[in-house]
Amino acid sequence: MSRRPWLRPAAMLGGGLLALALAVSLWVLWRNLHGEAALVPDAPPAAAPDAALLARGAYLAKAGNCAGCHTARGGAPYAGGRAIATPFGTVYAGNLTPDASGLGGWTAAQFRRALWHGRSADGRLLVPAFPYTHYTLVTRADADALWAHLRSLPPVAQANRPHALRWPYGSQAALAVWRALFFSPQAGNGPALATQAAVADAVVQRGAYLVNGLGHCSACHGSRNMLGGSGALGSDGGGSAVPGQRWQAPSLTDPQQLAMGRRSASELVQLLKTGLSDQAAVMGPMAEVVADSTQHLSDADLQAMVAYLQSLAPKPGAAAPRTASLPPGESSTLDRGRQLYADQCVDCHGPQGQGAPGAYPALAGNPIVTLPDATNLVQAIIGGGFAPATAGNPRPYGMPPYDLPHDDLAALATWLRASWGHDAAPVSAVQVLLAR
């Protein structure tokens, strides 16, 4: 008989925890290797890429807005170095030019593996700020065209800067766990798997491929959990704060937000093509997306993207839930907001909030005015409203910033959200302070 029987339960518990840790480790390993074939180098190309392939690759780079992240302010295109804020620290975009400090030592097979499986040339896991969770849908043909375009760029010698992520988020172990939880590789099976359900319409299928693949729209417009895992568009309400910036990326499917299901397809295509429509103007981070990416896409692809997004949203005629109106007894707030609008805004946006077509967007019926979260409206007022310069709107009009006191800005925003048939919740001075 043992003199220390209490050791047996402790030993059993320790053995159980060890077995559990081993099982979890094996599961993480399996999830990280599942669906990933061995890396096989491509055969040497029979000829140099032709002009059509290079043009196709350049177009796909615009669709993915690759230069948007991989070009530092004032730096050479695609040479990397841009700091990208995340909730876990700062990520620095890599050099995509064919210099030895960039992709010069890579092969086409390694590049496809980075897109499809989130691995660098040496096999190390990439941080998911590089949206391989979306690029895994990109087809082999599109991946090879994109590779050909990047190889044709002028080489720029610029070493990649190490990420500044808090421990343990940048470690290979943490990235492996994240991948196991939130990543399902598709290895280029984009057209078949981009939609949430089987869709017979080829236009919608094309839109789904662009939105969920190279466009990686849900990286901003989808919801994110505390570990940075994002949901697919249409899987929940969606929408999230843009990391490092005081802007919200609204949901593309929630009827209380952009209400895409009740807006005309032509207006949404115009917004993506020029940055301005009679009903709205893009500002903040989305202005960069329009300037660097969507304005360069064909009308057919923009129509396909809009068709797909509208297929996820409530159908035309569906009524959006109403939100709370201004509490009784607060008429002084509305009076103050009305006077501020008359003093500061009416000359451009009109007495009925109708705006001026081609110059100033309407505020009446503008979904940004009535979003449940008023952050973007406050940012537009205090930071100014500047649509991007595009081929369709080369000299956009801008709105100057207004440095109003918290109470005044709250009164103006509240009046805008209660006028012209709007019935959005009031904005408090505290909300303004937090938005600033």
Image (cartoon, rainbow, N blue to C red):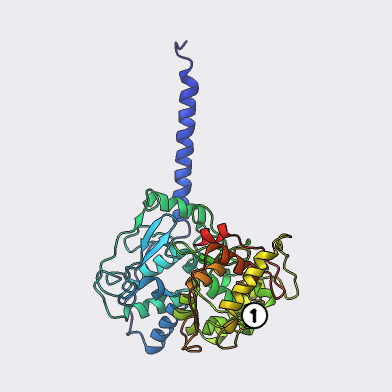
Give x and y (percent) for residue 265: 64, 82
Does residue 258 sit above or below 373 in this rendering?
Answer: below
User: Circle 1 sits on which residue?
Assistant: 353
Give x and y (percent) for residue 160: 29, 65
Residue 199 visible in the picture: no
Give x and y (percent) for residue 7: 46, 19
Residue 128 visible in the picture: yes
Does residue 262 sit above or below 300 in this rendering?
Answer: above
Does residue 257 sit above or below 76 in this rendering?
Answer: above
Q: How many marks?
A: 1
SS at mark 1 in the image: loop
Q: Nearer the viewer, residue 139 or 41?
A: 139
Does residue 146 sit above or below 121 in this rendering?
Answer: below
Report which quarter residue 263 is drawn in: bottom right
Q: Nearer the viewer, residue 381 or 184?
A: 381
The amino acid marked with disc number 1 is Gly
Report which quarter residue 123 is drawn in: bottom left
Report which quarter residue 81 is drawn in: bottom left
Give x and y (percent) for residue 105: 27, 69
Q: Nearer the viewer, residue 92 or 26?
A: 92
- Binning the other alpha carbons within 10 Å of mark 1 as few (below 14), some (14 to 19) or many (20 upward) gives many
Taking the spot 62% from the left edge, 73% from the top edge, the residue there is 339
